[in-house]
Image (tube, rainbow, N blue to C red):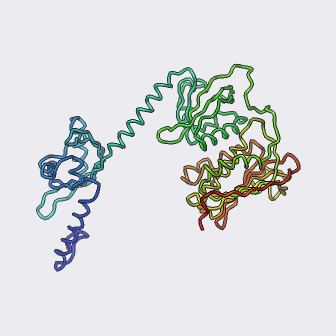
Amino acid sequence: MPSRRSALDVSEHASRPRAAAVARKLEWFASRTQQAIFVGGAQRTLEWANEAACSLCGLPLEDLLARRLELFPDDPDAERRAAQHVSQKLSAGETARLEAAIRHRDGRALWIDLQVMPVPAEGGEGAGWVAIAEDITERKRAQAALADSEERYRNLVEGLSEPVAVHSQGRLVYANRAAIELLGTRSPEKLLGRPVFDFLHPDCHALAVERILKMELVGEPAEPVVQTLLRIDGTPVDVEVSAAPIVWRGEPAIQLTGRVVEAGREAEGGAGAPCALVDLASVVLELAPRIEDRIAPRAAVSFDLAGALVAAPEESRALAELVCAVVAQTAAALPRGRGSLRLQTSLCPLSHDEASAFVPADALPSGLFALVEACAKDAVLDPQLPGALFEASFPARFRGAGPGLAGALRLARAHRGALRVTAGEGELRIALALPAAQRPLRARSRALANVLPAPR
């Protein structure tokens, strides 16, 4: 039978020159890679190490070769378990991988991500091993600091008499004892992982979405507001809720703190709040600096605004946050944020067929509507993106492609409106339709452009 040959084997006439060339290349690579490479034989003795390995241990090569590769030098039990794990894997012809502690020559404790691969015996040479190590000390410190921070956070808020909760990516990820009891249970397992809107009365969804969008866009705490929460059994309870953006386990999150409102106190901004006529053109004009400086700072932004009145609760900023959410998602389609972004307001009669193109389906009757439309030219679109914009999982599925429109849709529905997305030929259009309040005002238009021009 023919002998087993490696990929580096060549004919007898060319084997030596090629083997020498390959050896030079391997030596060149090993001497320049940032990963520490150790080569050893039986009993963990070292036979060779590259410069990165010497630097990792703080020893010259001759001193390093006189030692054994010692793992967990300050923890005999951990060292014994690591040695047993590596020995078992190598005996089975498998690669061993573990995180281990070593000690630098200067006394510093280091953590490494270690892979040890078996080298079978061949040509009279005994079996050996090759190990690749990467310094992960900073990562371990960051993980420890994060765990310590979370533990200190828990210790701080767990015993508070006021309810404290944290939600991230739309789901509840933490609740202290007071919050758990407020929601009518003693088991955190019945709460954690569930959508945060499961515990909020539907009448409060629009305001909650507005506050979440504002905190995500601005990064500042939201003012306290009275909201109606729903306990596990569905019974309502009015709570004054304060909210602030935080980081939870490395992910953006929102911390909620609450205070139960005494019976008889009216919720601020509730369904009975007085309404006023709001001109969408004025809303967009007031948002122009925010759009140009923060939401789309690299785009060439233009405005074509005609007066369009809608009814909205007084003192509510929901419409402004809704417009910002539509603009932010449209601007996210511009490559590197550069391109043409056009904002338009108008009054438009919609037929039944035209209204049915909005989401949710059949949400709008035919009639006169006030429109805010954002259009991105030279947009780069994933073919699956337009259909997924309204899904709550959009930000996770399409990272870096914008916040999605799930929150904006809930806010639009709270104002009896709907959204429409059209895409094609390097263009993305997102339109918001709200019931018009009365005849149009005198048309106004304005053209603005940022200092940075659109790419040619």
Corner quadrant of residue 161: top right
Corner quadrant of residue 223: top right
Question: Residue drawn at (65%, 61%), measured in percent from left and top?
Answer: 340
Q: Nearer the viewer, residue 121 or 365?
A: 365
Q: Is residue 164 left or right of residue 127?
A: right
Question: Residue drawn at (78%, 37%), measured in percent from left and top?
Answer: 313
The image position of residue 148, as x and y in percent, is 40, 32
Classify 257 as above or below 134. above
Question: Residue drawn at (47%, 29%), measured in percent from left and top?
Answer: 153
Q: Nearer the viewer, residue 164 or 31?
A: 31
Q: Nearer the viewer, residue 262 or 75?
A: 262
The image position of residue 262, as x and y in percent, is 69, 19
Q: Is residue 451 left or right of residue 439?
A: left
* Label total for image: 0
Corner quadrant of residue 102: top left
Classify 307 as above or below 384. above
Question: Residue drawn at (18%, 75%), measured in percent from left and top?
Answer: 17
The image position of residue 344, as x and y in percent, is 75, 56
Q: Quadrant of the C terminus?
A: bottom right
Q: Is residue 311 left or right of residue 195?
A: right
Q: Is residue 417 left or right of residue 6?
A: right
